[in-house]
Image (cartoon, rainbow, N blue to C red):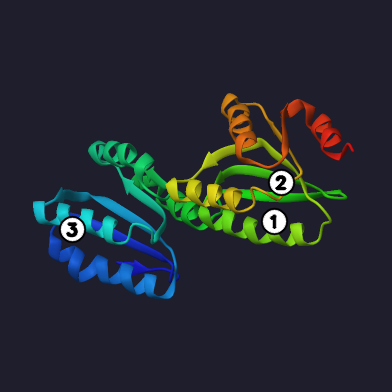
Amino acid sequence: MKQMDGALIEAELSGEITSADYTETLVPAVENALAAHDRIRLLVIMGQEFRGYDLSAAWADTRLGLDHWRGFDRIAVVADQKWVQIGVRLAAPILPCPVQVFELAEVETARRWLRESLGAVHMIDLGGPCLQVRLMGKLDPEVIAQAEADLDAHIRERDGFRLLLDLTEFDGWQGLSALGAHFSLVRERAGIPERVAVAGDKGWQHMAQRVASRFLNARTHYFESADIEGAKAWLMAS
């Protein structure tokens, strides 16, 4: 067990894991990290000697996830065992944070994935009340939280607010917590924009614009990504 930089924990598993391994090693490391950080990132390395969990350890593993459900920011699992890889991939969509599986030869790639930003939000001033917000890559809660602060600053500086939401390079959300953070950001500012233009090239993005138009107190319009200039012109029109 290694605590790399406070918010990043690295655990290497070998042999058969028991509940004592959790209660005496992993759980204290997680709780100590959470005492100093709101969210932590976990790297789990399952070496060739890893044989699995006994029944009590399986329950301890479940309890660890439930008790610290909102404390994990990102989890990387490194393993060559196919049953591990399949199990993690099946569970990943219902977990509240991004989860990625790597093979043992990719352990350094896993460490980089834990440290790097998976997505970005760029804000471009279009003049007057108009702001272009570009969502890029896969967004995690940390990126969304920073975007929230930046968006508030832009809104305060403007007399009125019109938004171009550029989804041409957006790949989605990393985990349920990122999706929840995104909707919280949108919901809390739903009554602010005068106009919202959505630019993208995927069917679900067009559907999102239609859904948003029902609860936003603003005119909304969808544009194909190739017509980004048309979106800007519509946004700026009187």
For label 3, the residue is 60
Vertical position of residue 70 compared to residue 211: above or below: below
* Crowding near the residue tagged with mark 1, few <14, some 14–19, many ≥20 C-alpha atoms within 10 Å: some
Q: Quadrant of residue 27?
A: bottom left
For label 1, the residue is 151
For label 2, the residue is 133
Secondary structure under badge 2?
strand
Q: Does the residue at mark 2 contact the one at mark 1 (Cβ under 8 Å)?
A: yes
Q: How many numbered marks does the figure carry? A: 3
Q: At 81% across and 61% down in the image, what residue appears?
A: 157
Q: Between 163 and 92, which is closer to the camera in this rendering?
A: 163
Q: Between 198 and 195, which is closer to the camera in this rendering?
A: 195
Of marks 2 and 1, which one's residue comes earlier in the chain?
2
Q: Position of residue 177 (x, y in %)?
A: 45, 51
Q: Position of residue 184 (x, y in %)?
A: 54, 52
Q: Quadrant of residue 156?
A: bottom right
Q: Position of residue 109 (x, y in %)?
A: 46, 49
Give the alpha-carbon distance from disc 2 to disc 1, as whole Å. Answer: 9 Å
Q: At 37% across and 56% down in the image, what residue appears?
A: 43
Q: Position of residue 151 (x, y in %)?
A: 69, 56
Vertical position of residue 125 compared to residue 169: above or below: below
* Crowding near the residue tagged with mark 3, few <14, some 14–19, many ≥20 C-alpha atoms within 10 Å: many
Vertical position of residue 132 compared to residue 59: above or below: above
Vertical position of residue 192 compared to residue 38: above or below: above
Please state which amino acid type lies under the numbered disc 2: Val
Secondary structure under badge 1?
helix
Of marks 3 and 1, which one's residue comes earlier in the chain?
3
Q: At 65% across and 61% down in the image, what residue appears?
A: 149
